[in-house]
Image: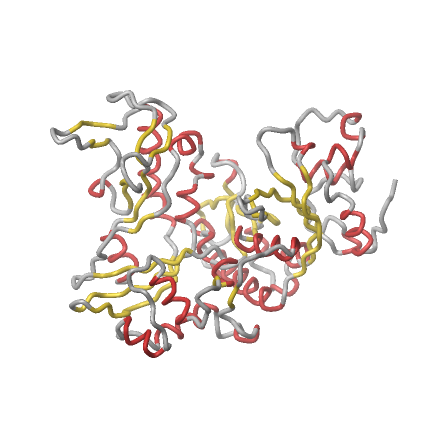
Amino acid sequence: MESYNIHSADSIIEFAKNLKGKTLRHACGDEIILHGYKGKGNFGQILEKYYFGYEPNSDTDPDFKEAGLELKTSPLKILKNGEYRSKERLVLNIINYTEVHKEKFETSSFLKKNSHLLLVFYLYSKEIDLINYDIKLVDEWLYPERDLAIIRRDWELIITKIKNGKAHELSEGDTFYLGACTKGSTALKSFRDQPFNKKKAKQRAFSLKQGYVNHIIANISKEEKAIYGKILKYPELINESTTIEDVVLEKFQKFYNKTSDEIEEHLNLKLNKRAKSYFANLTKAILGIQLDQKIEEFEKADIIVKAVRLMENNLPKENMSFPAFEYETLAKTRWEDSDFKNILESKFFIVFYKYQGNNLILKKAKFWNMKNSDILEAKKVWKRMKKLILEGKIVREITKNGTRKTYFPKLSENRISHVRPHAQNSKDTFPLPVADEKTKVNCYTKHSFWLNAAYIRNEIYLK
């Protein structure tokens, strides 16, 4: 029974908004059970079939072709403060390597399918059946002009890589808002031919990055508490010859070879050098962002911002740390779904300061993402760590003074990455999935993956 006008986007959106506050079981009634639902399928397919009344498909046209509207569903999580956040990136359409390089953005299959989205966000829970998920947010999304300018550049970069025979080297760290995420298992069947190289490439799909999806959620829910500052004051700053990277780096280049004190003085600032947020605040100030604001474009693009202090030989004073991992989570996670892979495929913005006596001199600012071959090399550290945890091989020996030495991958074992403690003290721990073979303990001090200082110097700073 038709409950909306298939030719009217407004009619479809209004019909969809009746879903808010309901579950699929509530919204679709007994239809789901009567048609043999046995806990299979996914949320979106069930919604399409039993609420909107059409068969799921993989057409290149939008789901509601006559109205030019594409339906997308996505899971939410709730923060401690009650705000909604995206659980994952929003996957759009599969990238057809053999055809997409022939397209122009304005008439592309991507834009035709995804220019007007109908979004249904539901609260995910691993404890309950998906037909009982609470639907929290329902609304349309049209890309603002300034966002579309960046998405266009992202799309063009992905297409250029395909044209250059580098589809197998695509990474989500290449781009800002629009990514090319892997789609499918790691089996051979998920690899595809590419037109300008005999080497097969992983199947990928266009996707909106998790940070950008959070931006959409904040707009739809109208509950965003954070204050954002824009680097790009006007959308026309992004044009045929200028990129967001150009705009950002130009702001930093003005201060190259100046001390942090000179930069503060020029910007009329007086920052607390002992504060953990010192370099983050200095970065914001250089970009023209208020200190109490988040950087909108960086948040939308999931950019990881790091400040690196170099010694006189250009070696970073410290290795680069990432958040501590949970042993139990690492043990049961596939590489494709791991936090570490997600970090390594991110886009970084790194600001390098070099010691000159007691002064820190701004030497370079750089957007960077790790090349595919290096990600595969760092993966070896992750795989070894997972194996050790599953085998209960944590503590190798305890020295006479009580220091515990582990089997964890050391700095000398891998060119790119290693594992080391990332805890306030020895009592700051995470549970182990398998008790340690030597000490029999069921939890261990928090650790994290680190990038090696020599790798940062050789592969990022000096290139």
Q: How many numbered marks are there?
A: 0
For the residue pair 223 and 75, the one nearer the viewer reads as 223
Residue lying farthest to the right in this orientation: 1
Q: Quadrant of residue 459?
A: bottom left
- Measuring from the top left, give residue 155's x and y in whole percent: 55, 60
- Measuring from the top left, give residue 86's x and y in whole percent: 57, 47
Query: From the viewer's perspective, is residue 384 above or below residue 178?
Result: above
Residue drawn at 43 percent across, 52 percent down = 346
On the picture, is 372 further left or further right than 130?
left
On the picture, is 414 further left or further right than 25?
left
- Measuring from the top left, give residue 6's x and y in whole percent: 83, 51
Q: Quadrant of residue 360?
A: bottom left
Residue drawn at 51 percent across, 67 percent down = 229
Q: Quadrant of the C terminus?
A: bottom left
Residue drawn at 18 percent across, 67 percent down = 358
Q: Quadrant of residue 104?
A: bottom right
Residue lying farthest to the left in this orientation: 400
Q: Quadrant of the N terminus?
A: top right
Residue drawn at 27 percent across, 69 percent down = 363
Query: From the viewer's perspective, is residue 80 above or below residue 406?
Result: below
For the residue pair 195 and 125, the one nearer the viewer reads as 125
- Measuring from the top left, give residue 129's x and y in whole percent: 65, 29
In the rendered view, how is the structure colored?
A: secondary structure
